[in-house]
Every structure is written in C-alpha cells, then in structure tokens.
Amino acid sequence: MLNFIDNMIDALERRNASMTVVAVAAALIGLVRTLLEVVLANRTYLGVDTLNNCVFYFVVAWGFTLVLARLGGVDWRRVMPVVLVGLIVGVLPPLIDVFIYGPGNFAYTYYFGLPDLLGLSLFDRSQGMPFGEGLCLWVAVGFAVYYVVLRTASWFRAGLAALGVYLAVFMLVGVALPSLARWLAGFVPQPAMVLNSLLQLLVGMAFYLGLRPRLALSLLVRSPHCLPFVLICLIGAAIHGPLSPMALLSAIVILVAGQVALVQNDYYDREEDRLAGRASAVEAGDVYWFNLFFAAFFMAIYWGQSLLYVPLGCIWLLAIVYHHEAFRFKRLFPINQAVEGLWGVLAYLAGALTVPNLMFSGELAFNALLIFLGWSLLAAFKDAKDIAADRAVGNRNFYTVLLARGVSLDRVHALVGLIGLSFCIVPCGWLWVKHFSAVWLVAFPLATLPVMAAAYRYPAGRRGVAMVLTALCYTLLLFLIAVLWAYAPPLAPR
C-alpha cells in the first residue's frame, strides 16, 4: 500500500499543475462539497456561502503547498499536483457523517471564538465539526507528516509540517479568520461571510507570495505607487461624509487592486524593463494567479451590501485593457493618460460610495473632473525614466510625443514640473471655495510646494519618480487631514 502511495506521489510530482488546474480543482471541490451538504445535511446555501467554499479550498491548497514545499525541500510546482489530489478528501465528510448521524442530522460551520480542548481536537459536533470532518482534517495532517518524512527522512521537519498545517491552514483559515470576520461585521456593514472570504483570499495571497519571495519583494518595493489611490479613496469618503469603517475597507480593497495592476504592469512591460536594464520578477503564472484571485475578490465584494464592486470592477478591467497585449492601451496617446485619470476618479468614487444615501451632485461631478484632469496630467512624470525604452517599443506618451515634435527634453521636464506644482495649488483653491479656515490656505502651500519643488529637481530616473511619488502622497495626506480636521473647531468651515 505504501509503495503504491509513493509511486503515485512520484508520478504526480512529474506533472507541474497549471494555474488553470488549481482554479478548476478548487472550484469543483467547493461546488461538490456544497451539493453534498445541501442534499445530505439539508443545509440552505446562499451564493456567498458557495463562493466561500470554493475560496476555502483554493486557499487551503496554497497553504498546504507552502508548508510541504518549504519543509519537504521540493519545488512548489511539483508539490501542487500532490496537494490537489489530496484535496479530494474535502468532499468526503458529508459522505461519512450521513452514515453516522443520518440525513439532516449534522451540520458544518466555522468555529467561532477561542476553541476549547474539544474544538482543538477538531471533533466538536456542537461547533460544526462532526466526526467525518475531524477525521478528514487529521488525515490531511497525517499526510503532511508522511510526505515530509518521505522526502527528507526528518521527523523533526515532519513535526513542523504537522504543526504548520494544523495552525496555518486549519486554525488560521478555519477558526481565526471566521472569528475575526464575525467581529468586523459588527463595525463594517457587510455580511460576515463576505468579510471571511476577503480575509481568506488575503491570506491566500500571503501563502502564494511565500512561495514567490522574489515577487513578494518586488511588490513590497513597488507598493508606494498604490498609496496615492488609497489616499484619494479616503478623501472621497471624507468629503462626502464621515470617515467610516466601510471607507477603510474600501481603501484596503483599492490597495489590493493596485497590487494586481502592478503585477500586470511588471509582466507586460518586461520588454521595456529589459531595454532599461531591469529584470522583472513576474512570470505569466503570477498574472494568472492575481487575476484569478481578484476575480474571487470581486465576486465576494459583489455579494456584499454596497456598490463598491462597480468602481472595483472598472479599475480591474481598465488595468487589463491598459496592460494586456490584446489591447495595450498603454501605447495609445492620449488614451493612456485618460486611463490614468479614470483610475483616480474610480478610487475617489470607491470612497464616496461608502457614504450612505450618496446622491449625485454638481460638487461630486466637479471633484471627479478635477481628479481626472490632475491624475491624467501628473501621471506623465512617471514616463521620464523610460524615454529610450518607450521609443524603442513604440509607446506613445507625453514625453515621446512632444520629443518627436521637436520639443526639447528640458522644456518637457519644465512643463511636467509646472503641472506638478499646480497640483499643490488646486487643493488650496478647493479649500478657499469651501470656506475653510485661512490657516489651511496658508499652511497647505507652505508645507507642500517646497516638497514638490524639490522633487522636480530630479526629473529623470527612479530617484525622480520616487521623490515625486513622495511629494504626491504628502500633498494628498495633508489634504485628507485638512478635510477631516476642518470639521472640528477652531478650523471648522465658516
């Protein structure tokens, strides 16, 4: 029997699982598990519950793979096929429990709160873990031990694998995250199962990045590019209503959407990066994984009680048409600048839509127009570092178009710098029109203009882009503070 299992593991490790196989396997097992619970346990399922089943198995697959690959010393692409076959165990609990308890006499739920000794044993029928569920969970732990011993002959590593599967996969995904989601549901007007799915997906992303440390480092370094969109989202919420927990959730969602866009950008810009002397850490499978991850993220938001999914879906689809080779709007001027502006507007609306009973108004439209124009123009600066590479591959942008028409590089830099400085002036005009205290009208330009002016002394290269990004975030953060603080004395609007 053990020889058969060993041979099967060897055969599976020779078949690298594609992202499509992982997605289909997790979805199929999640749907079959749903069907078995409906038929055998008489459970009533909502759409978000079914989605969560698929998300759970998707995340568990990556958690298992991370533990076995790191402790078994095997490349994760070889481990994943083994894990996917083992994932079939997930459909067995209803088939076992129906023979033990009878149809409709058992139920499955997440364990909420701090588990007692019976809960830690994974056999607690009163908490939604009947015998069949606990048995299959412990079989999974046992398989992790067997696999690591088979590959390393180390019982110490095997013990760590058992602990890792038990804590990182079962206790974290099955106990801690659902409990946290239920607690957050008391503050954020979203169903607990929606929040649970979002939390599990974020942990799934952490599992995946644990398998791709070079990609994780690249995203960490590039994450500041997402901060302006996070800040404009919070500004949208603060302008139209009090900053609520839902606004904070919206900002987190925008940050996640930014990570997906960064992965797409780094992969589809690999030729430009090569010409500029940079090596991309992103592979084709990473793009597939993050798009798949975000599709599930989008579906979970869709089942929530807000319209956040509308700007979220638009941001995601615009990222695809901007970067993907089938569309490559990045090469079409001025469409590329318009897409940048739309991203800013959508981030603003993602924050504004968290305000209950938000109505269309002239102020909303005017703010959106200002953001669109500012974001479209200011985005030109990031292309200063890649002028030669953009020319070589045919990317038309603010710099390459003006340079092709005979405008000197210094003049283009000066024009972009003027746009950046005006970005600091426009918020002052907005504060003045809204009758904010004169304190802000003086403090705002004094605090922001020197930072932006210093940034534009380095118009080319990554250093220049980093400085402008810092200045932009500084400006937006100060504006957010002004909006939040100005509603309290002595700086309240007159």
Image: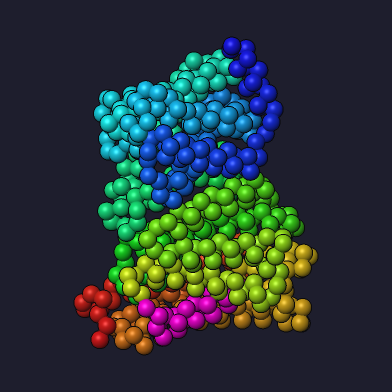
Q: Residue at x 49, y 67 (%)?
A: 311
Q: How many marks?
A: 0
Q: Residue at x 46, y 22 (%)?
A: 139
Outermost residue on the right side: it is 392
Outermost residue on the left side: it is 489
Give how far across and how far down residue 489 sits, in percent: 21, 77
Give how far across and how far down residue 365 sits, in percent: 45, 82
Give how far across and how far down residue 47 sits, in percent: 44, 51
Q: Note whether 435 is above or below 196 in the view shown.
A: below
In which quadrant is the C terminus drawn?
bottom left
Q: Residue at x 45, y 71 (%)?
A: 348
Q: Is residue 256 visible?
A: no
Give how far across and how far down residue 8 sits, in percent: 64, 21
Task: Give the quarter of the image for residue 479.
Answer: bottom left
Q: Tell me how the rendering is colored.
A: rainbow
Q: Along the horizontal axis of the image, is 458 left or right of 359?
A: right
The secondary structure that dominates the magenta segment is helix
Is residue 376 in the magenta section?
A: yes
In which quadrant is the N terminus drawn?
top right
Q: Residue at x 30, y 52 (%)?
A: 185
Q: Along the horizontal axis of the image, is 201 left or right of 439?
A: right
Is residue 468 in the magenta section?
A: no
Of residue 319 and residue 123, the one placed in the foreground of this image is 123
Q: Is residue 386 visible?
A: yes
Of residue 50 and residue 180, the one placed in the foreground of this image is 50
Of residue 456 and residue 173, the one placed in the foreground of this image is 173
Q: Which residues are magenta?
A: 359-380
